Image: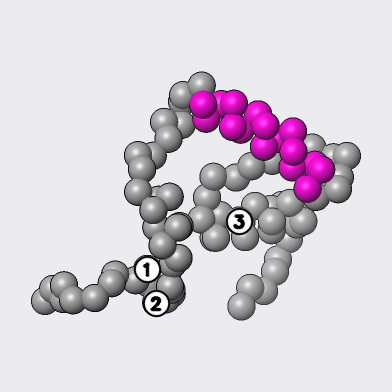
């Protein structure tokens, strides 16, 4: 069954209202991850992230969804073989 009336809403877990300016910004082709533009963007992000997080340490960028973020965080605070309870 398809319903074509009204606006479409992003439903993760949703529905979530998305401002028109954001919707308009999303209506463009995806950036080629191997292009010079993406390499330059990544370089500038890696330079700016320590300033944002006020650290002198090395920062990393994870290309992942929310679960990937949790996995990265857990893998950086636990040792291999540690047992944890996750709710």
Residue lying furthest left in this view? 1
Which residue corresponds to mark 1?
10
Segment tinted magenta in the rendering: 37-52
Which residue corresponds to mark 2?
15
The disc, 2 or 1, on the residue closer to the chain's N-terminal end is 1
Q: Is residue 81 visible?
A: no
Left or right for 5, reference 79: left
Which residue corresponds to mark 3?
69
Whole-percent x, y for residue 56 in the image? 88, 39
Crowding at mark 1 (Cα within 10 Å: few <14, some 14-19, many 20+): few
Tag 2–tag 1 contact (CB < 8 Å): yes
Tag 1–tag 3 contact (CB < 8 Å): no
- Residue 75 painted magenta: no
Q: Is residue 14 visible?
A: yes
Q: Is residue 17 above or below residue 31?
A: below
Left or right for 77, reference 34: right
Left or right for 5, reference 54: left
Q: Residue at x 46, y 25 (%)?
A: 34
Task: Tell which of 15 and 71 is nearer to you.
Answer: 15
Asked where in the image residue 42 lies, by quadrant, the reply is top right
Asked where in the image residue 70 lies, by quadrant, the reply is bottom right
Give the spatial CA distance, label 2 vs label 1: 6 Å
Picture disc at residue 65: none
The disc, 1 or 3, on the residue closer to the chain's N-terminal end is 1
Q: Nearer the viewer, mark 1 or mark 3?
A: 1
């Amino acid at each position: 069954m398809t319903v074509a009336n009204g606006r479409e809403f992003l439903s993760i877990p949703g529905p979530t209202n998305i401002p028109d300016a954001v919707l308009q910004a999303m209506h463009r082709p995806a950036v080629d991850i191997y292009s010079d533009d993406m390499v330059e963007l990544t370089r500038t992000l890696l330079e700016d992230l320590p300033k944002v997080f006020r650290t002198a340490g090395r920062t990393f960028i994870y290309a992942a969804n929310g679960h990937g973020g949790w996995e990265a965080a857990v893998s950086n605070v636990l040792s291999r073989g540690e047992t944890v309870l996750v709710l």
